[in-house]
Image: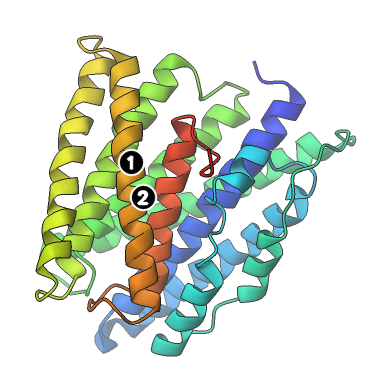
Amino acid sequence: MLSDQEFITMSIDLNLFFLRIMKEHSLFLQLAFTPKDSALGEEAAGFRAAFENLLAQATELAHGTVSQAAVESRQITTPYTVEAENLTSFYTGVPINTSLTQQQNMLRPYSRPVRAGLAREVEILNRRAYQLTGALAEFKERLLANVRACRMFTMNYPLLIEHILREARFFMNMLVTLVNRENPMTAEGLINQETFWNRIMAEHSKFIAGLLDPSEETLIDTARNFGKQFDALTAQALQAARQTASIAQVTAQSREETMKLRDFKEAGANGILECKIESIIIPLLADHVLREANHYLCVLGTCNLQE
Ligand SMILES: [Fe+2]
């Protein structure tokens, strides 16, 4: 059973990370529709605005409640986020609220006594996040079904739509765990998260390989190798979940490989922002996958990247 303080901090950390992820998924969906599906583009834009609104509420509640670990891990924003947002706006003409990002860059953990009613406000935030993410998940499901049945076309890979749908469901499950005041970081919870995130890391590697310009052969090879490593780590985490492999060993190997992938993603984000890598990777997507690696490292116990 989580205390009020634990419930508040875990909820705020989770929302700051995932509401931004969901807001960006909405943008990636919005940008990939063809002119024929402009109505769907508007629907995605509506989700983006709604998630931004909730993210602003979460940010208000985060002063004095966010954990030091979440801030240090660069999972909420990275030093590249604002620049990636600006370049994405420049390329696409879609305005992005960078002042919210700047506000989040200023978030500092400090302990403030839990004021009366805060746990209730955070619970309301969790419930709103659950509802909105549920609606976005339905939208993603509908798109995926239509794309898979060749009833429509979008510039997003079907696996990318499936991937972001899985992330939405994972966020919803985490919210349920917290609202039930259960700790998601038990040994069982951790191994489930490792199974989930290793698969996510494998898919990121495959997306990167597939979105780089075909001339970027070395980077494509590296990305493909990461894909294979993380497929193997996903299988190992599944074995650990069935208690046929050592959890500690899977955790250590996942951490080591995620650090390497994180560095690769950071170099990629830099290269894209500096116009040194040719690709069809949206700059904000490069920063988005970097943040997810940072989040996962923090789950694995390495929140401070300077360590
Ligand atoms: Fe992802």
Q: Residue furthest top?
A: 243
Q: Is residue 152 above or below residue 244?
A: below
Q: Quadrant of the N terminus?
A: top right
Q: Which element carries disc 2, helix, strand or loop?
A: helix
- The residue shown at (20%, 69%) is 211
Question: What's the CA distance linking mark 2 and mark 1?
Answer: 6 Å
Q: How is the image coloured?
A: rainbow
Of residue 72 and residue 247, the one placed in the foreground of this image is 72
Residue type at numbered disc 1: Thr
Q: Is residue 55 above or below residue 47?
A: above
Residue of label 1 = 258
Q: Tag on residue 58?
A: none
- The residue shown at (27%, 63%) is 143
| Mark 2 crowd level (few <14, some 14–19, many ≥20, 10 Å Cα) | many
Number of marks in the rendered image? 2
Verify CB contact (< 8 Å) between mark 2 and mark 1.
Answer: yes
Residue of label 2 = 262
- The residue shown at (29%, 76%) is 32
Q: Position of residue 305 (x, y in %)?
A: 51, 44
- The residue shown at (67%, 47%) is 125
Q: Is residue 71 above or below residue 217?
A: above
Q: Position of residue 142 (x, y in %)?
A: 28, 59
Residue type at numbered disc 2: Arg
| Mark 1 crowd level (few <14, some 14–19, many ≥20, 10 Å Cα) | many
* Residue 232 found in image quarter: top left
Of residue 111 and residue 304, the one placed in the foreground of this image is 304
| Side of 221 where 113 appears, left or right | right
| Side of 205 where 91 appears, left or right | right
Q: Position of residue 63 (x, y in %)?
A: 78, 50
Q: Position of residue 231 (x, y in %)?
A: 16, 38
Res 10 visible: yes
Q: Is residue 91 above or below residue 71?
A: below
